[in-house]
Amino acid sequence: MLILLLIILPLFGAAMLAAWSGADRTRSCRFALGWSVLPLACVAFIGTQDKINGVMAEAPPLTWIPDAKMDLRFSIDGISWLFLLLTCLVTLFSFASSLASGRGGRAYCGLILVLQSALFGVFTARHFIPWFLCWEMTLIPSYLLIRLWGGHGAPRAALRFFIMTLGGSAFMLVGFLALQLSVGTMDFSELAKLASDHALAGGLAKTFAATGMTGSALLTIVALAVFLGLAVKVPVVPFHAWLPAAYAEAPTPVTMLLTGLLSKMGVYGLLRIFLPIFPEVLPSLAPLLTGLAVATILLGAMAALAQTDLKRILAYSSVNHLGYCVMAIAASAAVHADRGALSAALSGTVLQAINHGVIASALFFGIGILESRSGGSRGLNDFGGLRAKTPVFCGVFGIAVFASLGLPGLSGFIGEFLMFNGVFALTPWAAAVSLIGLLLTAVFLLRMIRKIFHGPLKPNFAKWADLSGTERGWFALAMALIVIPGLWPQALLHFTNPVILNILDLLSPIP
């Protein structure tokens, strides 16, 4: 019942906001901020539970459509728990940023809580239908938050975001419907078992015999359809066209949700759904996936170098960083032999996704402070010399930047190290080429720090004050979440290792 409570709590908070007709902008945001602590406490309690076969919590399956074998089944294992924790933390940061920048209102805060509930469903559902419903439900509040509270270009950016992600989801739905017709189930665990027995290709060949295609070819088409739906969300080049405008036009607190959580949905889907269900055809798809991942890394970094808008720089930086996750997953698909390298690559993927969500949220929190104090300016050349007036802000923002660069001792390092350690053993050429992306990342992030905080102080910033006590408190939390995993990565690996071993048994079973 804990899982159902977790999913319902944000919806109940949103309903209370809708009924609170007298709440102004500030009170609505403060209520939502306080209410979002309840799911965090629930997730923290679940994290203390003993694991049974790697599962920390499981809701009793509820029969929904018996004739189609569709059940509402939810469970939480170590990886799911980390993504749930990330959802709670980024939502807190988003509300804190909203409060600091004067954003809020009942509708605004209610939509964020609805989005949080849908994300909880995505990270806990174990059957495609409830998972897909939650996946699609994230589109509605995200679209409205961008469209109604974004900048001048928000209508077009929101529409592009909606159409591209909905289009990718349509392909994914068709792929799973083909599996339902062929093997009679869309339960993730059952599909993974059938895949390990090499039964999916045979089922597709029998059901779609009229096409004259082999089962392997049909399964490859289904896998590509599912990959497309996930790739749009990550996003993978060339399916990233919606991202720069959406990140730039959305309110900064909403951008934190987009980069910290919605992009992680794609990584989670690739890791927990795509890999276990399609091991039969993954080796043949690996070259394509690896090429797309390397292109995402390099083009994301080069695009960030060409930007002058701070939010667009960080938007393309997110594309670059999540490209490493796709590269590690693609390398895991290429070779099913070296379990040590596979384990390193997949463990690094999870850590990169979680840590990037926190780091990116901290960076966008800083951009939000710059925007609110400067009256909306966020150009790379709009600032300068702020280190002299805001040394604390410069320090904490710099730590977040160096964490994004993968500085040893900070959270961004361990994920990148594990991924490259695994990928070098599995697909050396991809790892070697992707190192260029690391160098380009250092260039555009260090240039951003130099432009904002160094050089002569511009006269219009002479009266700026440093971070307030509340802002320092939120940055202190972010710094703790950046430093502690960097010094003690086992705190996260403790949760991921059992689940990674289960995935490895599907990809590369022990003889």
Image: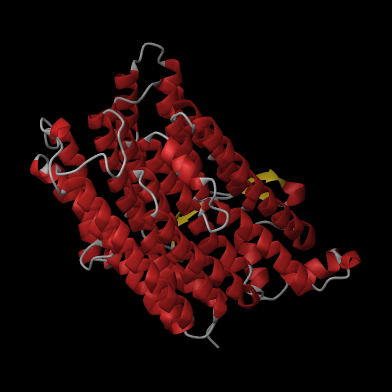
Query: Where is 379 relative to 426, above or below?
Result: above
Query: Where is 86 relative to 377, above or below?
Result: below
Residue drawn at x 28%, y 65% as measured from the top left: 406
Nearer-the-camera pick, 288 or 307: 307
Nearer-the-camera pick, 440 or 92: 440
Query: Where is 460 relative to 244, above or below?
Result: above
* 58 displayed left or right of 305: right
Report if residue 479 is visible in the image. no
Residue drawn at x 57%, y 61% as measured from the top left: 273
Place of residue 281 in the rendered image (x, y in percent of width and height, measured from the top left):
66, 74
Place of residue 287 in the rendered image (x, y in percent of width and height, measured from the top left):
59, 75
* 325 displayed left or right of 69: left
Residue drawn at x 36%, y 63% as measured from the top left: 351
Quick one: which residue is furthest to the top in this view? 22
Place of residue 232 in the rendered image (x, y in percent of width and height, measured from the top left):
57, 52
Quick one: which residue is furthest to the right in this view? 210
Q: Quadrant of residue 416?
A: bottom left
